Structure formats: C-alpha cells, structure tokens
C-alpha cells in the first residue's frame, strides 16, 4: 500500500478558542496532471467512491453533474452506514489547459445542512495543486439534531468530526494523487 502524503490543515486566520469547535479544514497535494484533467475526474461525482474512505458510491440522477445538480451519497465507516443528499454549488472548469478551476457541493441529511466540500485546482509546476476543503454547516436551527444524527448514523460526534475528516481528506487526496500520478512537489499546508 502506498504511503500517505504528509499534509497539514490550513489555518483559517485564527485558532479556535478553548472549547470552540473548529469548523473548517483544508488539505492539499500536488499531482502530475493538468488542472482541467483533475477537475474532470473530481467533478464526476460518480468517482467519489474511488477517492473517499467514507463515501462508497454517489448516485447522480442525470450525469454529468452541473451547477445545481442534486445527488445522493452512500457512505460507510466501520459498522456505520448512512446516506447524504447533496447539491453542486460551484462548478468552474479551468478555461485553459493550465487554468484554475473549482468544484464544491453542500451535503445534508433529512433537510438539515451538514457540510460544504470543495476542491480548487491550481497549476503548480508541471502539475496541479489540488486543495480539498471542508466547512461544517451544522449550526443554527437544527444544528444539534444534525450533530445527534451524525453520532447515531455515522458514529462520529462533533468533537471527533474534524480529526475524522482530516484523516479522510488526506486519504482522498493520496488516492487521487495515485490515480493521477504521484505529485511533482511536496504536499503540505493549504
């Protein structure tokens, strides 16, 4: 099994206060492929089960995904199995072979928002810097219910979600890098 790249979470401008939950993460890796090619792989949501350690399959009713497309993700971690519904919020393909691109989607369950996942694709050397981001949307009205559902169905309460997602993002990016060819640069802070 290939070793995972060493990646660190990016800082969002300030450290969380003691007792305050971290609600954003970023990880990145450099892969040996053009931004347009990597964007095409990642924005085909049906591939997500190949990269993610939690997502097993994504059903898109009318592929390929477009801005506003809805989809269902089928997830599993250990004995826990759950589904999420999602909507593509950003789909900006690189306009030139070496241009920048972006892809993002929101996921939720039973109408409650859970998270925003995003990917940026930026040229770096002969390859592409792929930055994966996660933003916790479980707040406000319904936030506590969304947290409880996460603990029951996904086996992860809010206190562990950041660590679980960080590890999952690193695995996702390592698998993507393997599919594209190992990176041309050192992975690290986003």
Image (tube, rainbow, N blue to C red):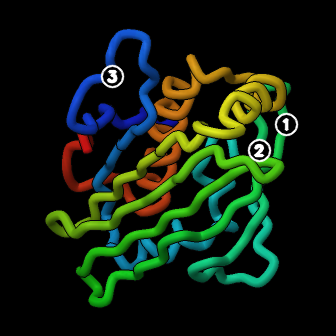
Callout 3–callout 1 Cβ contact below 8 Å: no
Whether residue 74 is visible here, answered yes or no, is no
| SS at mark 1 in the image | strand
* Residue occupying image coordinates x 64% and y 64%: 47
Q: Which label number is shown at residue 75?
A: 2
User: Quick check: 22 left or right of 45?
Assistant: left
User: Quick check: 112 left or right of 38?
Assistant: right
Residue bearing the label numbered 1: 81
Q: How far apart are marks 2 and 3 (CA)?
A: 29 Å
Q: How far apart are marks 1 and 2 (CA)?
A: 6 Å
Viewer-side residue, 128 vs 104: 104
* Residue occupying image coordinates x 25% and y 34%: 11
Callout 1–callout 2 Cβ contact below 8 Å: yes
- Please state the horizontal and vertical placement of residue 120, each as a whole percent of the image: 35, 63
- Please state the horizontal and vertical placement of residue 90, each as a whole percent of the image: 48, 72
Is residue 178 depicted above or below 26 in this figure?
below
Viewer-side residue, 148 vs 82: 148
| SS at mark 3 in the image | loop
User: Quick check: 140 left or right of 12?
Assistant: right
């Amino acid at each position: 099994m290939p070793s995972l790249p060493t990646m660190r979470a990016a800082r969002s401008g300030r450290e969380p206060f003691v007792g305050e939950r971290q609600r954003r993460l970023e990880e990145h890796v450099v892969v040996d492929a053009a931004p347009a090619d990597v964007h095409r792989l990642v924005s085909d949501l049906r591939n997500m089960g190949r990269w993610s350690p939690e997502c097993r399959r994504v059903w898109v009713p009318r592929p390929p995904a477009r801005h506003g497309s809805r989809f269902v993700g089928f997830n599993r971690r250990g004995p826990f199995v759950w589904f999420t519904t999602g909507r593509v919020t950003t789909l900006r393909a690189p306009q030139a072979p070496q241009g920048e691109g972006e892809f993002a989607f929101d996921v939720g369950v039973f109408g409650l928002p859970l998270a925003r996942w995003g990917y940026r694709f930026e040229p770096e050397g002969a390859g592409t810097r792929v930055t994966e981001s996660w933003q916790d949307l479980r707040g406000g009205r319904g936030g506590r219910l969304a947290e409880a559902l996460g603990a029951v169905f996904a086996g992860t309460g809010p206190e562990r979600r950041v660590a679980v997602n960080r590890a999952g993002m690193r695995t996702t990016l390592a698998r993507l890098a393997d599919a594209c060819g190992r990176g041309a640069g050192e992975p690290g802070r986003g």
